[in-house]
């Protein structure tokens, strides 16, 4: 499946988005930008054949890319996950064109933003990169690129995320709503998917830069590991710390620090921490507890009692899936349910009233 986007189209897309977000009119007529663009084209030309393979996995169907990893293909196949289609090719022509354009533009915009926001003294050596080796390493990061690139985004002062959000809000979300008729909840999940796709492109550019510098991947990988050793989860201690306050106070704390879209990203990130054997049943699991959300008494229960209720359910699904129970996984399931509640409260004023949580 050949790419529809070329470098000149990507350059126009990049410039339009940057101009809309940042005051940078003069920069695009400068000699510095001309050199940046020249180097960006070298990278684009080098990686595009491998990008075709990756984007074929995103467009579907599973097994068409030639990559012998059905688990990765299942995770990143957009039409299968969100549109109930095995492939973009099975969709009506107009919808196929729209979604394939959105997929390609999102990914390559991420790559191009990296090449514009960062510099590398050895970027011109990209022609010497062994793309077979790089691709096999990068694709594992691409699946969880949003998580992998959190520090990167922070070091760029949040500019990558701002560029993505403008592009998504102005082009992709309207199409998902108006052409594909997706509801709020599914569009929220699509936001996380496309954000990860954007950062997968940025991550590919970063990998290329690291290789040309001669830096070993182990050094790159360690940059994104947690800065401190995490203490092991102890459910008894957590429960004791929650006792004595109503459950809605825990939700209120989440709302103070996060917005709706941040909840979506946190939910998707938490799912990735859970064993594959229970991920498929998580939506039904959360829906079971969501049914309690319109009862005011639920929100006023002691936090430790709600904790026990959710942990009991978590033990049940782990046992049914034949998965050994451990405190960290059980707590992550509790967090998943709690963040789902927080997301619902953040976007539904009526539910916020029932929960007894004041408007922020």
Image: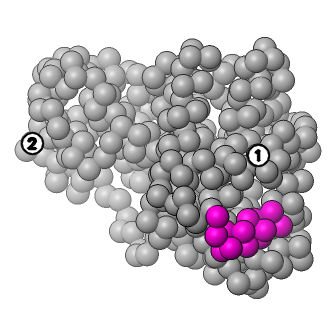
* Residue situated in front as seen by the camera: 300 or 184: 184
Front in this rendered view, residue 131 or 292:
131
**Residue designated by label 2:** 245
User: Which residue corresponds to the image point at 71% horizontal and 26% vertical from the top-left?
Assistant: 98
Image quadrant where residue 322 sits: top right
User: Residue 167 at x, y = what percent?
Assistant: 56, 41
Q: Quadrant of the N terminus?
A: top right
Q: Position of residue 2 (x, y in %)?
A: 90, 40
Give the quarter of the figure containing the C terminus. top left
Mark number, residue 9: 1
- The answer to which of 156 and 316 lies nearer the viewer is 156
Q: Residue at x 74, y 56 (%)?
A: 139
Q: Residue at x 62, y 16 (%)?
A: 179
Q: Is residue 77 magenta?
A: no
Q: In this image, 125 relative to 328: left or right? A: right
Can residue 330 be seen here? no
C-alpha gap between disc 1 and disc 2: 56 Å
Rendered position, 200 above or below 125 = above
By secondary structure, the bulk of the magenta-drawn segment is best described as helix
Disc number lying in front (1 or 2): 1
The span picked out in magenta is: 29-43
Mark 1 vs 2: CB contact within 8 A: no
Secondary structure at numbered mark 2: loop
The residue furthest left is 244
In this picture, is 325 found above or below 31?
A: above
Residue 324's spot in the image, x, y percent? 52, 47
- The relative height of residue 350 versus residue 11 in the rendered view (above or below) is above
Task: Judge the density around disc 2: few (<14), some (14-19), many (≥20) Cα neighbours within 10 Å.
Answer: some
Q: Image quarter for residue 231?
A: bottom left
Residue at the location (67% across, 46% down)?
A: 13
Q: What is the x, y in percent for residue 200?
A: 66, 54
């Amino acid at each position: 499946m050949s790419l529809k986007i070329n470098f000149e189209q990507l350059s126009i897309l990049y410039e339009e988005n940057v101009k809309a977000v940042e005051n940078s009119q003069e920069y695009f007529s400068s000699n510095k930008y001309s050199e940046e663009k020249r180097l960006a084209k070298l990278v684009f030309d080098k990686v595009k054949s491998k990008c075709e393979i990756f984007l074929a996995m995103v467009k579907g169907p599973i097994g068409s890319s030639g990559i012998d990893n059905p688990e990765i293909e299942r995770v990143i196949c957009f039409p299968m996950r969100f549109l109930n289609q095995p492939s973009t090719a099975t969709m009506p022509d107009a919808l196929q064109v729209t979604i394939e354009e959105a997929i390609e533009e999102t990914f390559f915009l991420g790559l191009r933003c990296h090449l514009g926001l960062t510099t590398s003294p050895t970027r011109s050596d990209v022609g010497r990169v062994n793309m077979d080796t790089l691709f096999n390493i990068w694709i594992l990061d691409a699946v969880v690129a949003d998580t992998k690139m959190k520090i990167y985004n922070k070091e760029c002062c949040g500019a990558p995320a701002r560029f993505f959000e403008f592009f998504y809000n102005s082009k992709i979300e309207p199409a998902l709503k108006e052409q594909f008729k997706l509801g709020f909840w599914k569009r929220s999940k699509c936001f996380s998917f496309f954000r990860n796709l954007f950062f997968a492109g940025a991550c590919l550019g970063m990998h290329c830069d690291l290789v040309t510098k001669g830096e070993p991947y182990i050094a790159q990988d360690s940059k994104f590991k947690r800065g401190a050793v995490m203490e092991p989860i102890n459910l008894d201690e957590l429960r004791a710390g929650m006792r004595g306050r109503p459950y809605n106070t825990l939700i209120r704390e989440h709302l103070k620090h996060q917005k709706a879209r941040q909840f979506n990203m946190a939910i998707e990130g938490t799912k990735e921490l859970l064993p594959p054997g229970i991920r498929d049943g998580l939506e039904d699991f959360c829906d079971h507890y969501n049914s309690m959300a319109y009862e005011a008494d639920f929100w006023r229960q002691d936090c430790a009692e709600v904790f026990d209720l959710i942990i009991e359910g978590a033990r049940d699904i782990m046992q049914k899936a034949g998965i050994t129970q451990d405190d960290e996984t059980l707590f992550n399931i509790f967090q998943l349910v709690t963040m789902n509640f927080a997301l619902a409260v953040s976007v539904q004023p009526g539910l916020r009233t029932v929960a007894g949580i004041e408007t922020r």
